[in-house]
Image (cartoon, rainbow, N blue to C red):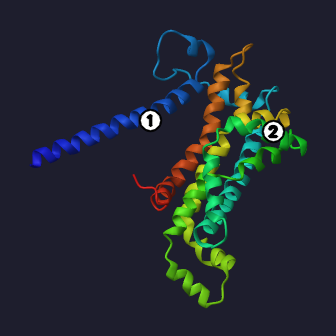
C-alpha cells in the first residue's frame, strides 16, 4: 500500500515537473533570444545560452527613433489601469442588480446579456468602429478604452457570486435603513474582494494583450500601445529579431508580475463564482 502511494506521489511529481518545463519553455526561449544578436538567432547551430549576452538589445529598443516604445508602454499601462477597475466595477454593479434587485423584465435583460456572449466579435467590430469614429474617438485613448468597459462574462460571474451571498447579512443592513444602493456599496461590494481582485487582474491582462481594436483605432503612432509597437519589428520589409524578442520580454514582464501577485485571487474568485469543475 505504501509502495503504491509512493509511486502515485512520484508520478504526480513527475507530471507536475514536466508540465512546469513545458510552461516555462517559451519564457526561456524568449529571454535567451532577447540576449542574442541576429547572427546567433539565425545560426543553424543550437546554443542553450548565448556566450556573450547582448544587453544593448534592450537599450536599442528604447532608443529606436522609428518606434517610441516608452510612450507605447505608457499608453498600454494607462489603458489597462483605467479599463480593469472600471469594467470590474460596472460588472459588479450589474451582477448585483441581476441577482438581488426585483424589476420587471430582468430575465429578458439577462438573456440579452447572455446573447452578447454568443455574438462573434467580428460581427460588432465594424459597427463599433463607426460609432466610435463618428464620436471622434479615432487616434484617442478613450476610443480604445470605452468599448472594453462592458464585460458580459464578468457580469454573469458576479451574478452567480451574489446569488450565493448570505441574505441574512443584507437583512441586517436593511434594519439600518440601507436601500439597494447602500446595501451594494456597504455590504455586497466590500465582501466581494476576491472576485474584484481576480476579475480585475484578468481584465488588466486582457486589456494589455489587446491588439486588433487598438490597431484600428490608434492609427497615429502617438496612440500606439505596446502590442502595436512590438508588431513593427516584424514586417514584410524588415525583421528585427533581437528587437522583437527584447520587446516581447519587456511587454510580458508586467503580466508575469500581475499573475504572480494575483494568482491566488484568480483561483479563489473563480472558485467562489459558482463555476465548479
What residue does disc 2 label?
Answer: 129
Task: Using the image as rendered, state which of residue 263 and residue 135 is in the foreground.
Answer: 135
Q: Is residue 74 above or below residue 187?
A: above
* SS for callout 2: helix
Tell whether label 2 touches label 1 (CB within 8 Å). no
The quadrant in which residue 237 appears is top right
Q: Whole-percent x and y of residue 69? A: 75, 34
Task: Using the image as rendered, state which of residue 54 and residue 104 is in the foreground.
Answer: 104
* SS for callout 1: helix
Q: Whole-percent x and y of residue 2? A: 10, 49
In this view, the residue farthest toward the top is 44
Task: Using the image as rendered, state which of residue 42 and residue 100 is in the foreground.
Answer: 100
What residue does disc 1 label?
Answer: 23
Left or right of residue 196, residue 238 in this image = right
Left or right of residue 120, residue 276 in this image = left
Q: Whole-percent x and y of residue 189? A: 61, 71
Q: Residues within 10 Å of mark 1 (few under 14, many from 20)?
A: few
Q: Is residue 271 above or below residue 224?
A: below
The quadrant in which residue 190 appears is bottom right
Total marks drawn? 2
Q: Residue at x 61, y 18 (%)?
A: 37
Q: Residue at x 68, y 58 (%)?
A: 85
| Label 1 vs 2, first from the N-terminus | 1
Q: Whole-percent x and y of residue 121? A: 67, 38
Q: CA distance from mark 1 to mark 2?
A: 36 Å
Q: Residue at x 63, y 50 (%)?
A: 203
For marks 1 and 2, give the one nearer the viewer.
Answer: 2
Q: Residues within 10 Å of mark 2 (few under 14, many from 20)?
A: some
Q: Residue at x 66, y 59 (%)?
A: 109
Amino acid at each position: 500500500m505504501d509502495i503504491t502511494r509512493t509511486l502515485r506521489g512520484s508520478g504526480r511529481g513527475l507530471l507536475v515537473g514536466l508540465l512546469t518545463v513545458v510552461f516555462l519553455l517559451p519564457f526561456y526561449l524568449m529571454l535567451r533570444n532577447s540576449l542574442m544578436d541576429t547572427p546567433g538567432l539565425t545560426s543553424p547551430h543550437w546554443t542553450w545560452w548565448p556566450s556573450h549576452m547582448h544587453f544593448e538589445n534592450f537599450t536599442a529598443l528604447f532608443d529606436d527613433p522609428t518606434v517610441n516604445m516608452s510612450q507605447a508602454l505608457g499608453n498600454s499601462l494607462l489603458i489597462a489601469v483605467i479599463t480593469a477597475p472600471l469594467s470590474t466595477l460596472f460588472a459588479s454593479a450589474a451582477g448585483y442588480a441581476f441577482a438581488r434587485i426585483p424589476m420587471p423584465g430582468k430575465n429578458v435583460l439577462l438573456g440579452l446579456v447572455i446573447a452578447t456572449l454568443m455574438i462573434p466579435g467580428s460581427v460588432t467590430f465594424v459597427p463599433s468602429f463607426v460609432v466610435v469614429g463618428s464620436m471622434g474617438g479615432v487616434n484617442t485613448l478613450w476610443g480604445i478604452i470605452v468599448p472594453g468597459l462592458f464585460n458580459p462574462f464578468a457580469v454573469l460571474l458576479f451574478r452567480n457570486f451574489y446569488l450565493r451571498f448570505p441574505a441574512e447579512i443584507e437583512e441586517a443592513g436593511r434594519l439600518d435603513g440601507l436601500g439597494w444602493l447602500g446595501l451594494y456599496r456597504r455590504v455586497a461590494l466590500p465582501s466581494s474582494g476576491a472576485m474584484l481582485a481576480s476579475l480585475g487582474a484578468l481584465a488588466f491582462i486582457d486589456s494589455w494583450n489587446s491588439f486588433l481594436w487598438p490597431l484600428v483605432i490608434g492609427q497615429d503612432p502617438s496612440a500606439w500601445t505596446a502590442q502595436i509597437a512590438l508588431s513593427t519589428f516584424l514586417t514584410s520589409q524588415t525583421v528585427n529579431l533581437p528587437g522583437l524578442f527584447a520587446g516581447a520580454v519587456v511587454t510580458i514582464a508586467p503580466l508575469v508580475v500581475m499573475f504572480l501577485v494575483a494568482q491566488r485571487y484568480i483561483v479563489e474568485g473563480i472558485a467562489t463564482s459558482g463555476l465548479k469543475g
